[in-house]
Amino acid sequence: MSAPRIFGVIGDPISHSASPRMHHAACRYLGLSYCYLPFRVATADLPEMMSLIRQFNFLGVNVTIPHKESVIKYMDELDATAQKIGAVNTIVNKSGKLIGFNTDGDGLLMALQEEAQLNLSGLGVVIIGAGGAAKGIAYALLQAGVGSLTILNRNVARATALAAPLQKQFPSISILAEALDSSAGFDALHQADLVIQATSVGMAPNILESPLKNYEWVKPSQICYDIIYKPAQTRFMGECTAQGARAIGGAGMLAGQGIEAFYLFTGQTVPYPVMRDALNE
Ligand code: NAP
């Protein structure tokens, strides 16, 4: 009997990762005897990890904080999305050739479709945050045909640096950058159909923190999506729900990016509930 193929996730820290649970649920569902392992990898050890992936013929690895950008220089090839975003969350080993992908944005689109049956075409969207996750999300939303996009960030220069190249790529869509807690930001939030919270504020253990001071912009017709998945109910979600909006947490995006990555690793599709339900175990 041949040894099971290995795949996994690299990051530092890594013990909190829910990815092993999701990918093992997918393997069980499909009857595959693959083994998905968490690897704590310091930045200085990235070159050795990349050579282990080749040496032990891994299917590939997922990549999490803090390596999504630093792994790029070890890739033999980058797919178009990872190249545009400048971040990799999935490395596929194709016979010793390492190919970098980014499935975060498509993971969010899958979650919005599965959990809110949302048609994004023409919608007014606000993203709160301009970090790595916001980048992938902004690109995916624009490709999906949203009507307008405003990026709000504490460091407004970072929001502008994200918006400007996107505006060149998507010239027909209005893309603005504003400061968090500004009056222009408040107006954009009030007018939005969909608001995506993509900062790290409110993530465990700092569960009482909120990225915004004011929630008077919230309307019951809005969908407010927080990409944070720990805790399952964030302060941001609580504030939006209190004003009558529908709030959704980030576990669906986590499942979605995992399903996209699993397909890249194995060529096999797993139904959304298989990975999503594994997060409730
Ligand atoms: P990142 O690159 O470090 O970006 C952090 C963002 O949070 C920046 O916009 C930063 O603003 C903002 N921020 C940090 N502290 C703040 C504060 N006190 N007040 C206001 N803004 C603040 O992180 P990331 O990789 O984008 O990840 C962001 C979050 O998304 C994390 O919680 C991560 O776990 C989650 N995530 C979830 C999924 C999923 O599948 N559900 C996938 C990826 C990431 P400045 O630029 O002003 O510093």
Image (cartoon, rainbow, N blue to C red):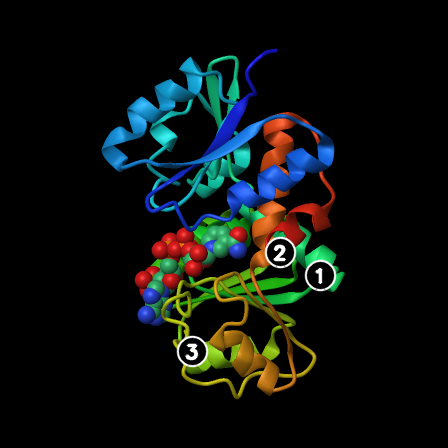
Q: Which residue is mark 1?
A: 115
Instruction: Determine contact: label 1, label 2, CB under 8 Å.
Output: yes
Inspect the image, locate mark 1, and give the three-letter code of the amino acid beneath it. Answer: Glu
Inspect the image, locate mark 3, and give the three-letter code of the amino acid beneath it. Answer: Leu
SS under mark 1: helix
Quarter of the image holding residue 163?
bottom left
Residue extending farthest to the left is 44
Q: Which residue is mark 2?
A: 252
Inspect the image, locate mark 2, and give the three-letter code of the amino acid beneath it. Answer: Gly
Image quarter (top left, top right, bottom left or bottom right) of the C terminus:
bottom right
Q: Position of residue 270 (x, y in %)?
A: 71, 39
Q: Position of residue 186 (x, y in %)?
A: 49, 81
Can you see residue 182?
yes
Q: Is residue 9 above or below residue 207?
A: above
Q: CA distance from mark 1 to mark 2?
A: 8 Å
Viewer-side residue, 10 vs 137 = 10
Q: Position of residue 19 (x, y in %)?
A: 52, 44
Mark 2, mark 3: which one is toward the viewer? 2
SS under mark 2: helix
**Where does ligand 1 appear, by image quarter?**
bottom left
Q: Which residue is mark 3?
A: 212
